[in-house]
Amino acid sequence: MQTRDAELRGSASVVECRALRKRYRERFAVDGVDLDVSRGVCFGLLGPNGAGKTTTLRMVYGVTRPTSGTVRVFGLDVARETRRVRARIGVTLQENALIEPLSAAENLRVFGRYHRIPRAQLERRIEELLDFLELRSHARLPVRALSGGFQRRLAIALSLINSPELLILDEPTTGLDPAVRLALWERIRELRAAGTTVLLTTHYMEEAERLCDELVILADGRIVARGAPADLIRELLAPQALELAVPESDEPAVLRGLDGVRRLRAGRRLVLYVPDAGGLLETLRHRGATGDPRAVVVRPANLEDVFLALTGTGLEGGA
Amino acid sequence: MSVSRYALSVWWRNAAMYRRTWKLNILPNFFEPILYLLSIGIGVGAYVSQMGGTSYVAFLAPGLVAVAAMNGASFEVTYNAFVRMNFEKTYASMLTTPIQPDDVLAGEVLWAVTRSAIYGSCFYVVVAAAGLAPLPASLWALPLIPLTGLLFAALGIAFSLRIPNIDLFSFYFTLFLTPLFLFSDVFFPLAERLPGWGLRVAEVLPLLHPVRLMRAAFRGEFAPILLWDLAYIAALSAALLVLAARVTRRRLGE
């Protein structure tokens, strides 16, 4: 099954990074990263600000030279075959780089020129993208006058102008309102369904959970976890979470008899990760150790928990 | 250097912007020479009966065409290029496509040369219409305009790539271009006012060479020193562009 799947998707990885490092002065922004992105998947790079996500992306599309290590995209050495690789990828940068006095259609036309797309083909593609990203209603207005959501959709449309096989998105939905974000997620899913490989960075855990087939979590330039979102949650924490409002001084009373339970403290809140949060809550109620009962939350563990556990507040408790 | 056809994509991007605003932009190009010619011709010209064998206003005309070419190129590769590079992230987005740093540089320089050609030609047309550019000899000015543009595109971009702050352009304009404007044979013949050593020092001034070429074109006279002027422009432009290419690759790639 594994091999058949690989064959169907084209066996080689679309992106392959080996022992990738990038040093700026004394600091390694990326410090030994290995990545394999298979064809047709949506792959996420997660991590706090400064973890090395953007630097990794920049090395993937060949604008930043690695200090050491190799990057291959479509099996090609990015450092040597930069143009050939870039002709087949699309990149949406963190900051929109639009030509503000020009309209959406004109921006797309200029960007198509960057790829030297023949005129007739370019005009067809512009029409497709105006529809696909719902830009048509304001396609003739100067971009300057349009909303942040419109501008972001246009920025993504620009990176699709060459019908890329690999789409790289650096924080695609940061700063957008929820409706725009949902719509963009839908578009990204459609692209993936049509066979585009997607490599994105985000620090929205919900985004990663909804979009990514696989992801890595970066901290200080290193990969601290990798896998499918659901597997990461199961393997690194537990399926369920019980949140309590318990001051730190009362913690020993709560944890009595719960040796080895993974827990996370965030201010006044204590989160316990267990296979059965409801059962644990019953036990704690019997002991009268639930803290403020109005603040009790039983919920599934999510990627945010994994992320916090790995990169942020310390996760305590034995393995 | 690995300049490719993609440099034209960079040029095209700037041209697309310019097309949007050219009607507004091109008007001042015509007004500036008219203002100069009126002020100098009616004003100063009345006190200076002749200079270098012609009327003062005719003496000024070729130098001012060179200055127009200088200005046309300089604005593009200074403020405009700096904004594209540092604020609008234009170059960063170009480098996500097959465009390479050398293409960005070549495209920007090519565009600055284009702007200088537009600006300088407008100026020339006004000067010619005023009867101050003898025809057909002064048509040699037309190829000299983009050549002047190239020199100042190279100077400007080399400066822009090295400064961290947009405010530093006021130094470039006030302490570099303005003195060039005032001391490069445009307003008075240096040879008549400077001692021998001063003239030799003045040969380093970039604007002096286009002005001398332009003046010779207007007079329809060839002199051997013009070969030195051409060589100076070619050599300095080439050296600055090689330097600029190195800095561009480093700044855009890191």
Image (cartoon, helix red, strand yellow):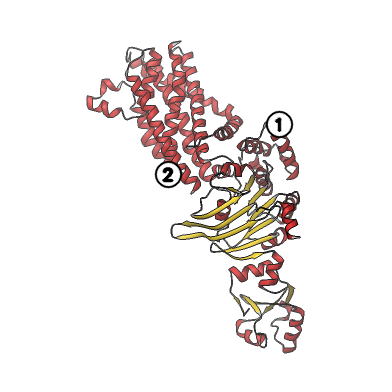
- For label 2, the residue is B163
Which element carries disc 2, helix, strand or loop?
loop
Please name the residue shown 59% across and 31% down the image: B21
The answer to which quarter of the image holds residue A206 is: bottom right
Q: Tell me which corner region of the image, top left, top right, bottom left or bottom right, holds residue A1.
A: bottom right
Amino acid type assigned to the residue bearing label 2 in the image: Ile
Name which quarter of the figure residue B11 lies in: top right
Q: Depth check: B123 or B232 in front?
A: B232
Mark 1: which amino acid? Ala
Counting other residues with Cα less than 10 Å from the Cα at mark 2, is it few (<14), some (14-19), or many (20 or more)? few
In the picture of the structure, the residue carrying the numbered disc 1 is: A120
At x 35% / y 20%, what residue is drawn? Answer: B227
Residues tagged by mark 1 and mark 2 found on one chain of the structure = no
Disc 1 and disc 2: Cα gap in Å?
Answer: 41 Å
Could you say where residue A275 lies in the image, as x and y percent from the top left?
73, 77
Chain letter for the residue marked with disc 1 in the picture: A
State left or right for residue A255 relative to residue B170: right
Residue depicted at x 52% and y 34%: B107
| Residue A207 x, y percent position in the rendering | 69, 59
- Residue A296: % across, % down: 72, 78
